[in-house]
Amino acid sequence: MGFKILLIIFTGFACGFAVGAGFVAFITVLGVIPRLMQLTKTMKMVVHYEWAVTLGAVAGGLFGLQNFQLSVHSFTAIIAGLLHGVFVGMLAAALYEALNVLPILFKRMNLDDRLIYLLMAIVLGKMCGSLFHWLYFPDFSTGS
Amino acid sequence: MNQTVYIRLRNRVQVRENAAVFLKDIALINAPGEMLDSLDNLVVHQVTKEDRNIVIIDGFKVIKMIRAKTGVDDIQLIGPEETIVEVVMKKKKMSVPVFLIVWLLLFTGSAISIMNFHEDVSMQKVHEKLFFLMTGIKDPKPLLIQIPYSIGIGLGMILFFNHLFKKRINEEPSPLEVEMFNYQQSIDQYLIFNEKKENMKRIDE
């Protein structure tokens, strides 16, 4: 019995270890944190940012898997949503950059000088797609 | 007589069709005054139809030509070792329809890909649960999270690309601009290596 429990604890720990390592690798490869530090000129605080990401992941794991419940005012959801969105937006932008599609596309089409407008197409597209998804999509997809 | 000619080639220049390429077009020259004029108007290359749109002018050849013309022994080449000459056929004009099509392509593509992403990671369920965790209200459409979230996506991307429409947030180039610069550099490197016959020596001729 005791052995079984130990085995389960070990398995859970191993899963968490792998997922955590993968998460850090993902964040690192996309370079969101360096970009933020560069924009805000806070390179010295890198250790704190690392902790923020780590603690955030742990907290997310705990909150997501347990059934804790806070009863804060529903307007705090706005802040959470906004922060969440900025983070996902940065991830998406970083992915675009990592994939290297855009420089080639813009060059082939001779559109180098209209960079900003094309970037705005992507940004607005993301926002509109997201809004559409939340506002109208659930009504269709649930069906009943 | 102790005379030195310093030549600094430019990285990339543009010339018109069938133009003669002068030394002053492709390089910065520092030479004794009486020589400067003849160096300025030294024709290093004549663009022909066979050149297509890229010509590489090798610094070594330029040195040879200068020596032949002026007889100076000491010619110093500073900076790039070759110049990429781009023959501009006609003024490349951006066509508005192409621009619009690319714009729509990017807009629609990114809109649908974000929806796919949300479905993929069950963002709807996560938002519902998050909203319930925070407020204790069960809401199948927690728009209080989702609308700020959608706006946040845009903000995050702008932050990453460092553009607020036409205004920059600070003076650093955006990652995309750096990426485009790197891409151009790689192309130039490739051209220098492959267009210059001196760089390759094959047995089969």
Image (cartoon, grey):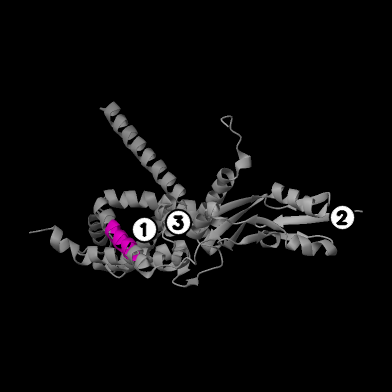
| Residue type at the position of mark 2 | Gln
- Alpha carbon separation for disc pair 2 and 3: 46 Å
- Where does residue B115 sit, x and y in percent of width and height? 26, 58
CB-based contact (under 8 Å), mark 1 and mark 3: no
A26 left or right of B146 in image: right
Considering the numbered disc 2 on the image, is that residue within a helix, a strand or a loop? Answer: loop
Q: Name the residue under label 2.
A: B3
Secondary structure state at the residue bearing disc 1? helix
Magenta span of residues: B103-114
Quick one: A97 or B8, which is closer to the camera? B8
Quadrant where the image shows the C terminus of chain B: top right
Give the answer, above or below, for where A30 lies relative to B157.
above
> Element type at marker 3?
helix
Give the numbered dot on residue A103: 3
Q: Is residue B50 magenta?
A: no
Give the amino acid at mark 3.
Pro
Residue B106 belongs to magenta span: yes
